[in-house]
Each structure stands twice: as C-alpha cells, then as structure tokens.
Amino acid sequence: MTRRTALLCSLLTAFSSFAASAGAADTKCYELRTYTAAPGKLDALLQRFRNHTVALFAKHGMTNVGYWVPAENPDRKLIYLLSYPDRTARDSSFKAFGSDPAWQTAQAASEVNGKLVDKVESRFLTATDFSKTDPVAAGNPSRIYELRTYTCGTDRLAPLLGRFRDHTVALFSKYGMKHFGYWTPSAGQPGASDTLMYLLVHDSKDAMAASFEAFRADPTWIAAKAASEKAAGGSLTVPDGVQSVVLLPTDFSPAP
C-alpha cells in the first residue's frame, strides 16, 4: 500500500467514524403526556391503553417509549412518553390516530358511563447530547423509575447541563443508577430555557436512597458541585427547584 493510499484510507476511516458519531445524535421529537383520570376511572383508562391505544399509536407511526403511574397516585395520573421522527410526523400521526375508526369505536365504548380523562398535559422534549438509555432487566417486582425535574435560575441551564455531561451522569452510573434518558423542553415549550428532565431506574426505593446517599458523599461530586456553583455565583437551581416523582411501569409499558 502506498503512503498516499494509506493516507486516503486513514482519512476515509476518520470521516466514517465522524459520520457515524454525528449520526448517533438523538434528534427525535419526544412527547411527555400526563393524563389525570376522572374519579374512579383510572383502571378503565389503563384498560383502554392496554387493549387499544398503545397498538393504535404504533399503527400510526408513534413509538411507545414507556408508560408509568406514580407510586403514590392520589391524583389518578398516567404518565407516558412517545417519540417521533420530528414534530411534523407527530402531528400527522395524531391526526391519523384520531380519525381511525378503531380508535373512535374504542373511545365511545369506554366512555358509555362518562369520560375517562379529566385533564391532558403535553410537553415536547429534546434529548440532551449526553442522554443515554441503559439496558434494564425485566421481572424485578421492586424496580422503580424516577422522574426528576430541575428548574434553573436565569442563565444557569447551560452550566447545569455541563455539570451533568462532565460529572453527574458518570457518578450516577458509579453508584448503580441506570439511565433512561435526559431531555430539555423543546424550543417554544414552557421551561425551554430553564428546565432539565430525566428518568432514572433503580432496583428498589431502598436502592434509590442508598445510591443517592453515596453519590452526595462522593468527593468528586462535592468538588464538581462547588466549582460549578462558584463559577455561576450560586446554586444552579432555584429554591425547591429539584422535583422527584417515583413511577411504576404499567404492565403494558415497553419500558420493563
């Protein structure tokens, strides 16, 4: 092989690696939807999703990412995550879903005795450049998901994302937490400039508590937190700006 050929091969390999890396970026449109069931209707709502809605979403090109209910659920919530190639595909899919005779029949039959849903909330999300999803083994009855929402002070979202990218994500892994995804609200959505949302997976509530206790005592975390707050002139989140909700996967959730 000539030197020129070797150089060309090297450049092609580097370009291929760059292209593969660039192609690995998660550019999908995510949608986090929260339903508040009417009083006494949560089981019927879950049944409609189990028997009809999930399959019809897939039929119309939506990706069912995960379905959960809060471990403590006095407000009768169903929380789920869908993804699409982009926002245009999302709107097209929902339009086709809404006009599908199978959906219209299922909806009408399920609402003979009244509507199942009192409130629907929707937020479009964009994956961060450090978002990742770890494999999660099914069959652990004590397994829990944790939805964490951080609200930042003015101009402090970028430093917070930097801290997660450079330190937090790896430290979570070090202490046994599994990652399901990290997102910020998409441009134009509420919280787009000041919110980070992510999902972790823990083996149990006790495991979650032990993992966070060890994480918070880690010298690397203590130093990273102190350095980031010194650079920003204070905490990166507003008072009470970290919210955590423990979630249980439904029996029809693709997320195990």
Image (tube, rainbow, N blue to C red):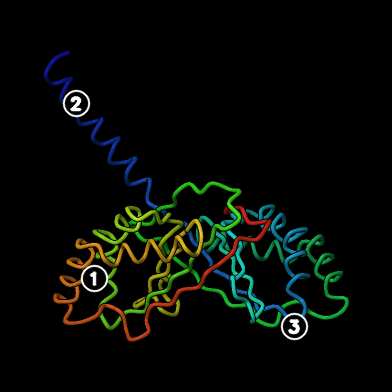
SS under mark 2: helix
Give the spatial CA distance, label 1 vs label 3: 42 Å
Q: Assess disc 2: are there few (<14), some (14-19) or many (≥20) residues with their C-alpha within 10 Å of its C-alpha.
A: few
Q: Residue lying at the far bottom in this picture: please name it.
A: 239
Left or right, 141 with respect to 6, comes to: right
- Quarter of the image with the N terminus in it: top left
Left or right, 89 with respect to 134, comes to: right
Give the spatial CA distance, label 3 vs label 2: 68 Å
* Rendered location of residue 120, percent (x, y): 63, 78
* Rendered location of residue 179, percent (x, y): 42, 56
Q: Are marks 3 and 2 in contact (CB under 8 Å)?
A: no
Q: Amino acid at mark 3?
A: Pro
The picture quadrant where one finds residue 253 is bottom right
The picture quadrant where one finds residue 126 is bottom left
Reading the image, the residue beneath label 2 is 8
**Residue 159: which numbered mark, if any?**
1
In the rendered view, tell whether residue 110 sits above or below residue 12.
Answer: below
**Residue 238: which numbered mark, if any?**
none
Q: Amino acid at mark 1?
A: Pro
